[in-house]
Image (cartoon, grey):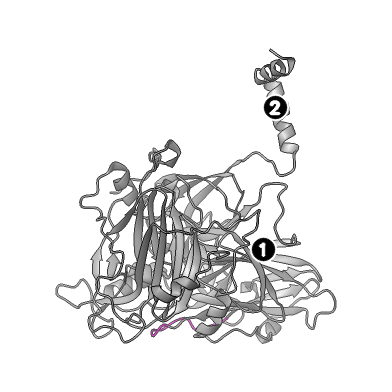
């Protein structure tokens, strides 16, 4: 035995030597030991006042919005949730891929049963191959109206951003405020069969700003900046039911990241961000003598709905240090130039700017071949007003609103689909026959068919492990064409193509971008258009894909992928945690 080998064996036997070796490794640039970061979420009611309305709302640790979670890529998060409100609750870590940790994904009745009042559950998962801005939110009914917060994933220590290091990083959560109880709002809508009442304001980090009646300067979010410094704004659209335009008066923004994936930087003065999406943008403050010391930051809705919507503009303030904007000045600040609420062209032009870095360090691993093709027609529909109906019929033409994919409106089960899958007990829970295409094709973006009624069921698509999937998501004009932000749990996907009108496989496939398409977890199906996505089903479990407009989710606009185990031990779904909640 050589002396070098002997020294190695002695080191393996020596705790002191092992500690020294670990210290040397940690000191090397770019290398750091992954950590376990622990948080406690105590879900309680707290009193909040906005727009002169004081009410008790669900919160995490008494905060609205909730606490910021900060991790580094490779870290493990352990979050103990204790439910001290009367509602059931679950939490979803939006955009986390949950590699073999589907039990922590969070959507109620999909990967777990809800945490009942007085109960608790520990979410445990490792952040793998992701960095940037994500977020967390309740995934039960409309509780995410106030139960949400940022989830920031930093690069490993010693690894730089692929863009200039900012002076400061600021999470900016865009939300909605309801004077009424959001749970009462959706309950009433489901009872009447009509559309829900809309929100009363948009918010920046929970604050509506000076454009609303009875909203003081204390209710205005202020971003204070220093001349010449660059700031990373971590934008999150946490609104329940609205896509939003965003802009900062007299400032250009540089988009560098989307849904925790780096993109080729591009400049924009007006952004559009859909519910569920995140976007990291760089804002550089003027170096010398800006024309003003205070500038309006504004959000306003983008929509083509034929129904009512919250057609208001919320304002926050960008203040250069030394400025003190009075309440009167806040209300008179010039607004940034945002597109009209129904400007689909502006949305399409902005969305077309996104490209993956596709570099040696950050490659775009776009699937070039496809094992299974799917075509999902997405949109609204109706249920007939038949007796007995538990409620009224205030939808179009004396019907009740519904929503569907391929004319199947998702029925939420009363037990966890992932639990049923793990136990291989499918009867009475789910059917593995979700249609790969509409049963009856029609002119999706033209004159709607005479029959707008949907079918109902808990139907999933089973996939073999490592199947390469392409899904074309086609908007429909049934009850009006509108954009639908679709979120896929458990995966990122590549957006390989998009267009307006009806998808035409013979022509549109040839125009796909298979070089540097953007990687996302939430994508808006264009109004009267289509989008094509690809992903590899290499994460076993049951993964819901749904519209992130909560009213559409409540009406059934969702489906689920059932991804089977692979042959190797590290390709199989582990057993559920011992404390996973049980359905009553």
In whole angstroms, how far apart are the C-alphas of marks 1 and 2?
A: 37 Å
Q: Mark 1 points at which residue?
A: 170
- Residue at image point 71% right, 78% down: 251
Image spot of residue 212 (x, y percent): 56, 82
Mark identifier at residue 274: none
Could you tell me which quadrant the N terminus lies in?
A: top right
Residue denoted by label 2: 19
Range of residues picked out in magenta: 305-313
Q: Nearer the viewer, residue 490 or 49?
A: 490
Horizontal side of residue 436 vs 346, given as left or right: left
Disc nearest the viewer among 1 and 2: 2
Q: Confirm whether residue 54 shows in the render.
A: no
- Tag 1 near tag 2, CB within 8 Å: no
For mark 1, does the 10 Å Cα neighbourhood hold few (<14), some (14 to 19), or many (20 or more) residues? few
Front-most of residues 560 and 309: 560
SS at circle 2:
helix
Q: Looking at the picture, does residue 279 appear above or below residue 576?
A: below
* Image vertical order of residue 572 relative to residue 520, above or below: above
**Which quarter of the figure has residue 408?**
bottom left
The quadrant holding residue 485 is: bottom left
In this rendering, position of residue 167 left or right of residue 563:
right
User: SS of the residue at dot 1?
Assistant: strand
Please indicate whether residue 251 sits to the left or right of residue 203 in the image: right
Pinpoint residue 223: horizontal percent, then vertical percent.
70, 70
Question: In the orientation shown, which residue stands out farthest toward the right?
Answer: 288
Name the residue furthest top: 1
| Residue 341 visible to the viewer | yes
Percent of width and height locating residue 83: 43, 51
The residue closer to the viewer here, 22 or 151, is 22
Above or below, 85 against 352 in this view is above
Identify the residue shown where x is 48% and y is 58%: 367
């Amino acid at each position: 035995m050589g002396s070098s080998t002997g020294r190695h064996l002695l080191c393996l036997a020596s705790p002191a030597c092992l500690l020294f070796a670990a210290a040397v490794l940690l000191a090397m640039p770019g290398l750091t030991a992954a950590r376990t970061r622990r948080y406690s979420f105590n879900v309680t009611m707290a009193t909040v006042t906005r727009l002169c309305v004081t009410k008790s709302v669900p919160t995490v640790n008494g905060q609205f919005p909730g606490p910021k979670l900060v991790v580094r890529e490779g870290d493990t998060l352990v979050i103990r949730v204790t439910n001290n409100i009367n509602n059931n609750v679950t939490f979803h870590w939006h955009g986390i891929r949950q590699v073999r940790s589907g039990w922590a994904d969070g959507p109620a009745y999909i990967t777990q049963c809800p945490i009942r009042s007085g109960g608790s559950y520990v979410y445990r998962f490792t952040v793998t191959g992701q960095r940037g801005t994500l977020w967390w939110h309740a995934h039960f009914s409309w509780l995410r109206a106030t139960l949400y917060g940022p989830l920031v994933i930093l690069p490993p220590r010693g690894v730089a951003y692929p863009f200039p290091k900012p002076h400061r990083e600021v999470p900016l959560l865009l939300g909605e405020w309801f004077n009424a109880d959001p749970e009462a709002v959706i309950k009433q809508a489901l009872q009447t069969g009509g559309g829900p009442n809309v929100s009363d304001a948009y918010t920046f980090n929970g604050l509506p700003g000076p454009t609303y009646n009875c909203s003081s300067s204390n209710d205005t979010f202020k971003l204070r900046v220093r001349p010449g410094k660059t700031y990373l704004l971590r934008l999150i659209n946490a609104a329940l039911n609205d896509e939003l335009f965003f802009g900062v008066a007299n400032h250009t923004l540089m988009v560098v990241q989307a849904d925790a994936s780096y993109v080729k930087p591009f400049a924009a003065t007006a952004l559009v961000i859909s519910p569920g999406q995140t976007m990291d943008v760089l804002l550089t403050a003027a170096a010398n003598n800006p024309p003003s010391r205070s500038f309006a930051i504004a959000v306003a809705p983008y929509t083509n709905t034929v129904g009512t919507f919250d057609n208001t503009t919320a304002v926050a303030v960008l203040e250069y240090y030394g400025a003190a904007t009075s309440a009167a000045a806040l209300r008179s600040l010039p607004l940034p130039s945002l597109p009209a609420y129904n400007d689909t062209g502006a949305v399409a032009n902005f969305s077309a700017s996104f490209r993956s870095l596709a570099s040696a360090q950050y490659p775009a691993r776009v699937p070039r071949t496809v094992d299974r093709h799917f075509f999902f027609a997405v949109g609204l529909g109706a249920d007939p007003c038949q007796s007995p109906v538990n409620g009224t019929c205030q939808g179009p033409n004396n019907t009740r609103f519904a929503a569907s994919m391929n004319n199947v409106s998702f029925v939420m089960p009363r037990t966890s689909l992932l639990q049923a899958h793990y136990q291989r007990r499918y009867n009475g829970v789910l059917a593995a026959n979700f249609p790969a295409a509409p049963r009856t094709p029609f002119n999706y973006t033209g004159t709607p068919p005479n029959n707008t009624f949907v079918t109902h069921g808990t139907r999933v698509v089973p996939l073999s492990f490592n199947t390469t999937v392409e899904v074309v998501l086609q908007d429909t004009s049934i009850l009006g064409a509108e954009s639908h932000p679709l979120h896929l749990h458990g995966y990122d996907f590549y957006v390989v193509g998009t267009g307006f009108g009806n998808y035409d496989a013979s022509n549109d496939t040839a125009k796909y971008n298979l070089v540097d398409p953007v990687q996302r977890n939430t994508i808006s199906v264009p109004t009267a258009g289509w989008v094509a996505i690809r992903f590899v089903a290499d994460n076993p479990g049951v993964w819901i894909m749904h519209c992130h407009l909560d009213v559409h989710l409540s009406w059934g606009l969702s489906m689920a992928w059932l991804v089977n185990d692979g042959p190797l031990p590290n390709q199989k779904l582990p057993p559920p945690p011992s404390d996973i909640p049980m359905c009553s």
